[in-house]
Amino acid sequence: MSTEPAESGTESLLEAKDLELWRGERRLFSQLSLSLGTGELLHITGANGCGKTSLLRVLCGLTLPETGEVSWRGQRVMRNRADYHAEMAYIGHRESLKGELSARENLSFDLQLRHALSPEDIDQALDRVGLARARDVMARGLSAGQKRRVSLARALASRARLWVLDEPYTNLDVPGRDFVDQMMSAHLATNGLVLLVAHQSHGVTGGRIRQLELA
Amino acid sequence: MEVPGLGQAFALQVGRDMRLAFRHLGQLANPLMFFIMVTTLFPLALNPSPQLLEAIAPGVVWVAALLASLLASESLFRQDVDDGTMEQLALSPQPLALMLLAKTAAHWLMTGLPLVLVSPIVAYGLFLPQEAVPVTMGALALATPILSLIGGMMAALTVGLRRGGGLLSLLILPIAMPVLIFGARATDLAMTGLESVGAIYLLAALLLLAMSLSPFAMAAAMRISLD
């Protein structure tokens, strides 16, 4: 199971070699290699429970695979977490928001750990995802779709090169889904990288799109 | 890209946790209420003669403080892991050890420091001689952060388990024993008018040890729990 290496011309930033992961008695994947270069999107698909999220967590450096290694700019991720994570934004299937903090407070904390930013940067990101009026609402008062939009704003404002998105379309309405597609297309156009796990097909245009089906 | 410095990240984390804690104060008051209740129940249940209370005061104060910290440590990382913010923290460019140390520091400010501050009142209720009060406060000020750090280490280890509560106390209590022994000893020595500085120094040494080593243990344990 492997995807063809990046075509010549684009440098490959994220590389994974011979990954193998077991969960309990079950082998989720083995000998999985992939690489992702600038302006590329890798769409990971597969049936429920086949290990898509686990693969993403391995690629993020959250889960240690049984064998194999993940590297970013030629350096092993496990040895250089800080460098890798400074360039990566992750949207998991949980929203990672504190219910007792407003959308703005949540983002301001998460983003200030990454880089210096002004309050306008956050407002701008929240405006872009359509939450201009809900900026100061406590996160627990937001709807599931609005929470997802806050997560999207976090990725947008993170200035990360690599976006790791686990089912970003969940809970979003039709304009919201279109927005995610646009957001990814724009990110690819500025030489960003996207790792996408989604059941449905995406509407990303431009960039180089590849697909990996997990069995 | 310029990643903010460690001091700034530490301050951000402490600030956020304090803000969250102030938004639900009720939960915060639990360990403090526990501490006050246990120490006031003893005089009610026992023969309230000053001699008896004075004799048991060091033990009661220290056991109550230990149990109150134990009670508090369960909630240290639970919520963050449940709502996924811990995942984002583990994926931030800041070292996880530092961020967890900051979380523990904020936790101590909200649960440990109040114990230190009310201890003179509690000591008064137990007829603890006045000359032992400053020493007890000092010893508690050193001991409660140690207990928070030990609690943090064990909480990080058990947070991945659904029902880690019982296991948590089992893990914390044996390691917390030296703190209890030296703390109660400091109060005891001060009561009898002896030099208690030795016990205080030992507590200070334990605090330094805990501060320097536990963040790394916490981070390693948390990564395992998040796996």
Image (tube, coloured by chain):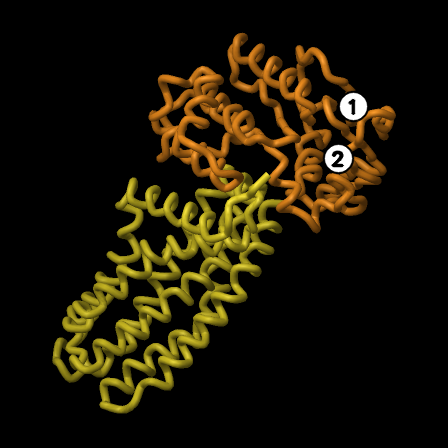
Q: Which label's residue is closer to the chain start, 2 or 1?
A: 2
Q: Nearer the viewer, residue B58 or A184?
A: A184
Location of residue A131 in the rendering, given as x and y in whole percent from the top left corner: 42, 18
- The reply to whether residue A151 is in sight is yes
**The image quarter in which residue B190 lies:** bottom left
- Asked if marks 2 and 1 fall on the same chain, the answer is yes
Amino acid found under the numbered disc labelled 1 = Glu
User: Which residue is most to the left?
Assistant: B49
Q: Which residue is mark 2?
A: A14
Rendered-image quadrant of the N terminus of chain B: top right
Q: For mark 1, what is the residue? A: A213
Relative depth, front residue between B80 and A49: B80
- The colour chain B appears in is yellow
Task: Say which residue appears at 44% left-offset and 53% top-offset.
Answer: B102
Which of label 2 and label 1 is nearer to you?
2
Q: Left or right? Give the position of B126 relative to B163.
A: left
User: What hue represents chain A?
Assistant: orange
Across and down, in percent, residue A152 comes to: 53, 24
Q: Residue at x 37, y 20 (%)?
A: A134
Does A150 appear above or below B209?
above
